[in-house]
Image (cartoon, rainbow, N blue to C red):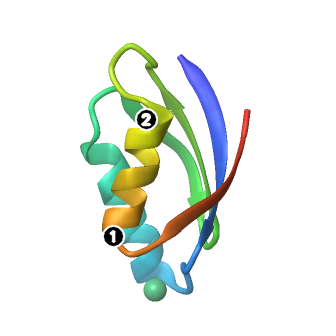
Amino acid sequence: MDRITMKIDGMSCGHCVSAVDKALKKLDGVSVENIGIGSATISYDPSAVSEQRIAEAVADEGYSVVATTH
Ligand SMILES: [Cu+2]
C-alpha cells in the first residue's frame, strides 16, 4: 500500500467532507485514513487504482486535488 496526502480545493463544510469520503471509499483498493476540510490522507493499492483515478473521483464530486504529498 502507498500512502498519500492530498490537498483538495473547494471543500468548505461537513457535506464536502462526506462527499469526498464516499467517493474515495467507492474506489477499489483505497482506504481513507484521515479526511477533513481541504485535505485527505489515504492508503491505496497501486495495482488496483492509480493516483490519477483517485484525483478523477474527487473531481467528479466537484473538488480538485491541487497537491499530493507522498
Ligand atoms: Cu460543503
Determine the residue positioned at 46% across, 50% down: 55
Spatial separation of the CA atoms under disc 1 and disc 2: 18 Å
Determine the residue positioned at 46% across, 19% down: 46
**Which percent across, then down, holds residue 41?**
61, 45
**Measured along the vertical axis of the image, is residue 45 above or below residue 57?**
above
The residue to which callout 2 is attached is 31
When asked about the image quadrant of residue 53, the answer is: top left
Helix or strand or loop: what does disc 1 sit on?
Answer: loop
**As drawn, which residue projects farthest toward the right?**
69
Closest to the observer, 37 or 53: 53
**Which percent across, then down, holds residue 52?**
45, 40
In this rendering, position of residue 33 left or right of residue 28:
right
Helix or strand or loop: what does disc 2 sit on?
Answer: strand
User: As shown in the figure, which amino acid type bears the numbered disc 1?
Assistant: Glu
The residue to which callout 1 is attached is 61
Going from N to C along the chain, the mark reached first, 1 or 2, is 2
Q: Nearer the viewer, mark 1 or mark 2?
A: 1
User: As shown in the figure, which amino acid type bears the numbered disc 2?
Assistant: Ser
Determine the residue positioned at 38% across, 75% down: 62
Q: Residues within 10 Å of mark 2 (few under 14, many from 20)?
A: some
**Which percent across, then down, holds residue 13?**
52, 85
In this rendering, position of residue 67 left or right of residue 41:
right
**Which percent across, then down, holds residue 2?**
59, 21
**Measured along the vertical axis of the image, is residue 14 above or below residue 41?**
below
Q: Quadrant of the C terminus?
A: top right
Q: Residues within 10 Å of mark 1 (few under 14, many from 20)?
A: few
* Label 2 beta carbon less than 8 Å to ligand 1: no
